[in-house]
Image (cartoon, helix red, strand yellow):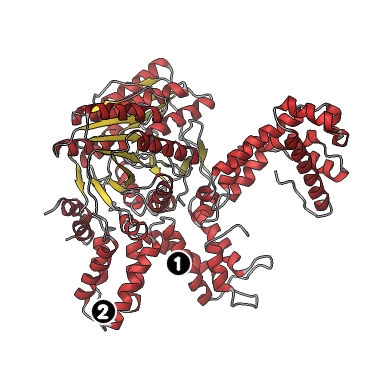
Amino acid sequence: MGFFSKLFAALKKTKDGIAEKLRGLFARDKIGEDFYDDLLDILISSDISVSTADEIVENLRDRMISEKVKDKDYVLSELKEELKACLDMADDFELETPAVIMVIGVNGVGKTTSIGKLARYLTANKKSVTIAAADTFRAAASDQLEIWADRAKVRIVKSSEGSDPSAVVFDAISSVKAKGTDVLIIDTAGRLHTKSNLMEELKKMSRVVEREHPNANFYKFIALDATTGQNALSQVEVFDEAVGIDGIILTKLDGTAKGGFVISLCNELQVPVAFVGTGEKLEDIELFDKDEFIEGIFGE
Amino acid sequence: MALFAGLSEKLNHIFSKITKRGKLTELEIKQAMREVRIALLEADVNLSVAKDFISKVSEKAVGQEILKSLSPAQQVIKIVNEELTALMGSTNSKLNVSSTPPTVIMMCGLQGAGKTTLCGKLALHLKKQGKKPLLVACDVYRPAAIGQLKIVGEKAGVEVFEKGQGNPVKIAESGIEHAKKFGFDTVIVDTAGRLHIDEALMQELENITKTVRVDEILLTVDSMTGQDAVNVAKTFNERLEVTGVVLTKLDGDTRGGACLSIKAVTGKPIKFSSVGEKLTDLEPFYPDRMASRILGMGDVLSLIEKAQQAVTEEEALKIEKKFKENSFTLEDYIEQFAMLKKMGGAKGLLEMLPGMGTKLKVSDADIDENKIERTKAIIFSMTKKERREPSILNYSRKMRIAKGSGTTIQEVNQLLKQFEQTKQMMKMMKGKRGFRLPF
């Protein structure tokens, strides 16, 4: 039993879970008029975008009608295939060192916590890691990060509250270059993607990395809260336009929300999911696995 | 209603075939409601909540007379908008107040919903109302959460009571004792973010409410929450008997349908909305505006209200009169800019318009604000006589003004040209009834 299956076991108990709804749908006597309409509703109600849900259902319906399929089990397995097709490139992610990982996202999605866990994950995989506390805006953010750095036993470069985040990035890069550190992880302040001045600040930090550490592989990860709804798409679009997104960290998957929006994100924007966060403990981070994710949604 | 893009376009399309006026038929309503349902789902309204809503609204809409002033699509939007507003409840941001102080307010919610920041905002809000609030730090789990609350408290000028990483129930208890002893009339208890399915932590909150008298339990919800909002709100409400909801991060571009789901499953009032990172960014919840937002129709109402607040009727009439008498001068021109500034600047205004939130390249608006400053500098460098009679401006006067304002003579000329254009435009509008200034 994979970690996703464990997570989704909690979901089975909730009546509103997508697995339960799908089971109800496929328990019907026959695939009638309303079947595909209801399927569309169920997909949307797992936070998949309307356009992707529509695409999935249309594809499925067309194929099932042209193949004159009556067998429900076959329809179900084909539905899974459609969903998997959306996630085709979802786990195409590989980290090459030396690397700089900049973690960005809106407020409260779990960036700082994810960075702590990511640092531990990388050191467990024999990489040397340094963290840069470039969230100089939120009260006590660097203190919070420092506690995580202690737990993960990695170095941290920090500055005082209100200082220029790009300067912190600059200092951290000088430090990792001097020490030959494999991975630098940059924490950034949470910002709503609608605040263009804060997006400019991100672009500046990004330019500093490219200029000061040209030999490093530069990854920009967006942290997304699994509880988020349709707005996830807008978040990724706008951050992607500003600095380019290389991967998603899907956080808080230990709740009852499943982060169904990643299906539409992968389908519509071709952004892979790099990591998933599954709790508040240091080791609660995993690589994304699309098959387990789909099986999890179906509650199997 | 011309601004209502998206949904209204789709509805217009459905009704485009209907030429004759009359009553809304069942078939038309059914087609229209499919679009409304999709719009609600796209706004993150929970599926079952959306379905219930649609069936109620359909019943009301069928057979309704189409008003003369509206198109059928507008009529449907009007009905839907009214019903949504009604469902989200009345404007009520009053907090419960205990007859025996201190009044105790407890925050609760998922991780990252914005509880700690909200604590600071609420404390400042109460302080402005003449209350004496105390913040109590009961988030003993998240690293540096207490430190964050202390900084937030300091910014708000409100005392923070903390006992380190102790037992939250005990800390709440002694915080309230502290409040009684030192004459605080309101206690705001910050708690750790927790999953609604985390049995141990939910029990902890229950224990706080059993040990001390809590007058207000505010569930803090991120407005970007998706379909799961229903599960979260239902569980918190069942376990704790929540008394109100606060919607955070509404300054983003989320449509915020989660609040409709929460209201529908808990029946509890949404008391505040949080709209920015500054401590003053706390507003009462306006159901009518939220309804428009969920339907994707922008915050037109907020815009109108903000304009009303910033510009008194008197001021507006004064300028209007000047236009009509054709005595509008550069002095009045500058007054207009001051009004614009009061309304949050060009940038603030633009952000409230439908569809402008993200699409708008705010750098454009930034330039505008700079331009406003330069314009002001130019006008302030003129003599009183020049401001009233720009026609006397010759080359040497213009050179002096350019030097005085740190601009160029070209910019001075540009301003004069714009001023003339504005006057011309206003003259043209003079005859029209119901004419109002743009701001």
**Can the viewer see residue B183 in this picture?**
yes
Label 2: few (<14), some (14–19) or many (≥20) C-alpha neighbours in 10 Å:
few
x, y percentage for residue B372? 67, 36
- Outermost residue toward the front in this view: A215
Please identify the quadrant where the C terminus of chain A is shown. Answer: bottom left
Q: Is residue B72 left or right of residue A271?
A: right
What amino acid is found at the position of numbered circle 2 in the picture?
Answer: Lys
Q: Nearer the viewer, residue B208 or B166?
A: B166
What amino acid is found at the position of numbered circle 1 in the picture?
Answer: Ser
Q: Which residue is mark 1?
A: B55
Q: Is residue A58 left or right of residue A78?
A: right
Label 1: few (<14), some (14–19) or many (≥20) C-alpha neighbours in 10 Å:
few
Image quarter of residue B8: bottom right
Alpha carbons under labels 2 and 1: distance apart: 25 Å
Q: Is residue A218 left or right of residue B358?
A: left
x, y percentage for residue B328? 83, 39
**Can the viewer see residue A138 in this picture?**
no
Q: Nearer the viewer, residue A300 or A249?
A: A249
Q: In the rendered image of this protein, does residue A90 appear above or below residue A78?
A: above
Instruction: Provide the chain ID for the residue under circle 2.
Output: A
Instruction: Provide the chain ID for the residue under circle 1.
Output: B
Q: Which residue is mark 2?
A: A30
Secondary element at image label 1 = helix
Residues under numbered marks 2 and 1 in contact, where contact means CB atoms less than 8 Å apart: no
Q: In the rendered image of this protein, does residue A216 appear above or below residue A232?
A: above
Secondary element at image label 2 = loop
x, y percentage for residue B346? 62, 41
Residue ID at (51%, 52%): B293
